[in-house]
Amino acid sequence: MKQIRATELAAWLRDTQRPQPVLLDVREPWELDQCRIEGIVHIPMHTVPLRCDELDTARDIVVICHHGGRSMQVAMFLERKGYASVFNLNGGVEAWACDVDPGMRRY
């Protein structure tokens, strides 16, 4: 599993020449009410085993949570299931708020 920093993900999302990744947010619904990165696909961590077939295996997947721990577990799970290009957002939405979007609400 690859790690990606918030600033690297932001650059990727701005790059119109590069295919865009699936942004898989595995946080709980109440956490999305606090803050979110635009364009996410929301599948709470505990439902990923039941719903991972909803993800496009042909696209890069960046897994997101609050600080990066849950997303790392989900990213490892997806790799074991055969997903070839999975990234963990190192530091999660907290890193995104600190390094990319300082106006984002933090919790």
Image (tube, rainbow, N blue to C red):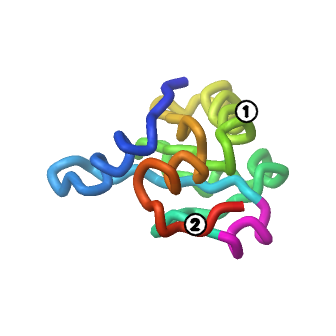
Q: Secondary structure at mark 1?
A: helix
* Depicted 14 relative to depicted 88: above or below: below
x%, y% of residue 96? 50, 51
Q: Which residue is mark 2?
A: 36
Crowd class of label 1 (few under 14; some 14 to 19; many from 20; radius 10 Å) = some
Assign the magenta stretch its main secondary structure.
Answer: helix
Disc 1 to disc 2, how far (Cα)? 20 Å
Which quarter of the image is occupied by the C terminus? bottom right
Q: Is residue 29 magenta?
A: yes
Answer whether residue 58 is visible to the viewer in this image.
Answer: no
Circle 1 or circle 2, nearest the eye: 2
Badge number at residue 73:
1
Name the residue nearer the viewer: 24 or 78: 24
Residue at the far bottom: name it: 33
Q: Is residue 71 magenta?
A: no
x%, y% of residue 83? 55, 34
Q: Residue at x 44, y 44 (%)?
A: 6
Q: Residue at x 18, y 57 (%)?
A: 16
> In the image, 67: left or right of 55?
right
The kind of residue tagged 2 is: Arg
Q: Residue at x 49, y 44 (%)?
A: 61
Give the quadrant of residue 41: bottom right
Bounds of the magenta segment: 28-34
x%, y% of residue 104? 53, 67
* Depicted 55 relative to depicted 88: above or below: below
Answer whether residue 99 is visible to the viewer in this image.
Answer: yes
